[in-house]
Amino acid sequence: ALHGRVLEKMLLEVEHLAQSSNKEDRSSLADVDGEAAKHFLDSLAAWGPTKVLKEYIKLYKYSRDRRKVSHSVNEDLKSAEIALQRRYLQTAAGYMKFPVQDIAEEFKEAIPRYEAHKDDSRDSLFDIARILTIVAPRVPLVALPEELVNNDSIDDTPRSYTLAPNSHACLEAMARLRMMQ
């Protein structure tokens, strides 16, 4: 529940920054707005199922190997690999081995231990369906009709949002959530 709340607050902050940057000088806040959206999307992927992280790594490697690749693809690949490594190392067994002398060696040891006990398609750190109900009204272009119903009854958190529907960050978030389903 904690990770879901953090993602929800991050999305609200991204929307607030985007709205502020639309009102003010675009050049001064454009970088902050884009960086906040990227951080939200990276967190969404990193805290989702590890199976999705593995798929992103395969996709980025494929893109890198098949065509002349931009610097951003290499950054995205490195980010996904680090997120997967952190998920492997953040286990009770990983914390019991303290201190970690060699991160690379610990990572090699953690992979079989982690994969032996986890269904990597269901190890998300947040409730995917709940986050989907938060993002769906923001992207009516791709949301299913049943996802557009008023979901304020889930809890007392307001579902207000400030951006025009179908913003780039929300569309990307919906695509990532669809991969996680």
Image (spheres, rainbow, N blue to C red):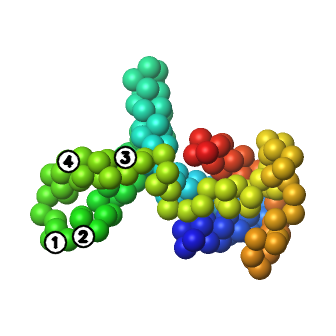
The x and y percentages for residue 176 are 61, 45
Neighbours of disc 1 within 10 Å: few (<14), some (14-19), many (20+):
few
First-in-chain label (2 vs 3): 3
Q: Do the residues labelled 3 and 1 touch (CB within 8 Å)?
A: no
Give the alpha-carbon distance from disc 1 to disc 2, as whole Å: 6 Å
Q: CA–CA distance between discs 2 and 3?
A: 20 Å
Query: Is any part of residue 140 visible from this angle?
Result: no
Q: Which amino acid does label 1 sit on?
A: Phe
Residue at mark 2: 95
> Is the residue under label 3 in contact with that under label 2 (CB below 8 Å)?
no
The residue positioned 82% from the left and 70% from the top of the image is: 152
Of 52 and 164, the residue lying toward us:
52
- The residue lying at 45 percent from left, 43 percent from top is 51
The quadrant in which residue 150 appears is bottom right
Question: According to the image, label 3 marks what residue?
Answer: 81
Mark 3 or 1, closer to the camera:
1
Q: Which amino acid does label 2 sit on?
A: Tyr
Secondary structure type for disc 2? helix
Label ID, residue 98: 1
Q: Which amino acid does label 4 sit on?
A: Lys
Report whether residue 117 is seen: yes
Q: Dot 4 lies on which element?
A: helix
Compare marks 4 and 2 and give the one earlier in the sequence: 2
| Disc 2 packing (10 Å; few <14; some 14–19; many ≥20) | few
Q: Distance between the residues labelled 3 and 4?
A: 13 Å
Q: Earlier in the sequence, mark 3 or mark 1?
A: 3
Residue 141 is left or right of residue 79, and the answer is right
Q: Name the residue under label 4.
A: 108
Note whether 61 is above or below 85 in the view shown.
above
Neighbour tally class for label 3: few under 14, some 14-19, many 20 plus, Cα within 10 Å: some
How crowded is the residue under tag 4: few (<14 C-alpha within 10 Å), some, or many (20+)? Answer: few
Q: Where is residue 141 in the image (x, y as percent from the top left)?
A: 84, 42
